[in-house]
Amino acid sequence: MASLPTISEVEQLLKTFFRREIDVSTTAAPAVPLSYAGAYVSGDGSMVAAVRADIGFAASSSAAFALIPAGVAKENIQSGKLDETFTELYAEVLNVLSRLFANRDNDRVTLSQKDIGQGTLASGNEKQALHIAVDVDGYAPGKLSFYLL
């Protein structure tokens, strides 16, 4: 069965993935569902987890992953949506985040659905959650939430 990651597991994965310093801290649950989301399934195909992020995390993580200047990420944030390149890059970020849901029995958890800025991925059946603020060195801060379903 999938489990929520710890804050230190999130920080370590993001530091390794982005190859830069990351500041991660817990935060309050968002007032409204964050609209940059991914849903994850276990090896048997059952939905087990979800990730939701705000535009700040989506743009900054995409840019940090691809070594795109922070100014370009900021343009996406200011526009309120990710452009085509950032949408593709954020899908890769969501894919990497699946590693955080792997259980201790090494059952594989994979990305099954993406909802990048549309707000169509259903919510409301979450059992557990971890809400964090993420500051990627050199980029805008953002919010990221992990859910077990």
Image (cartoon, grey):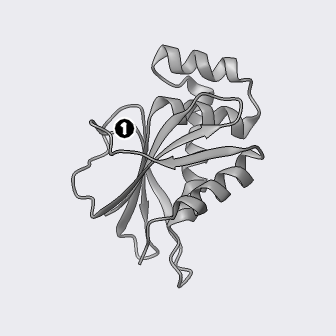
- Taking the image as shown, residue 129 lies to the left or right of residue 3, namely left
Could you tell me the amino acid type at mark 1? Leu
**Closer to us: 31 or 117:** 31
Quadrant for the N terminus, please. bottom left
Q: Residue furthest left?
A: 124
Residue 108, how many percent across, how many down? 53, 73
Using the rendered image of the protein, determine whether residue 97 is visible from the camera's viewpoint: yes
Q: Is the residue 9 above or below the residue 145 in the image?
A: below
The picture quadrant where one finds residue 18 is top right
The picture quadrant where one finds residue 140 is top right
Q: How many marks?
A: 1
Q: At 26% across and 49% down in the image, what residue appears?
A: 123
Residue located beneath label 1 in the image? 34
Residue 37, how many percent across, how many down? 42, 44
Q: Secondary structure at mark 1?
A: loop
- Taking the image as shown, residue 112 lies to the left or right of residue 94, namely left
Residue 83, how many percent across, how many down? 56, 22
- Taking the image as shown, residue 3 lies to the left or right of residue 73, namely left
**Closer to us: 128 or 49:** 128
Q: Local crowd at mark 1 within 10 Å, few (<14), some, or many (≥20)?
A: some
Q: Residue furthest bottom?
A: 105
Using the rendered image of the protein, determine whether residue 89 is visible from the camera's viewpoint: no
Q: At 71% across and 51% down in the image, what residue appears?
A: 15
Residue 112, how many percent across, how many down? 45, 56
Q: At 67% across and 58% down in the image, what residue appears?
A: 12
Quadrant for the C terminus, please. bottom left
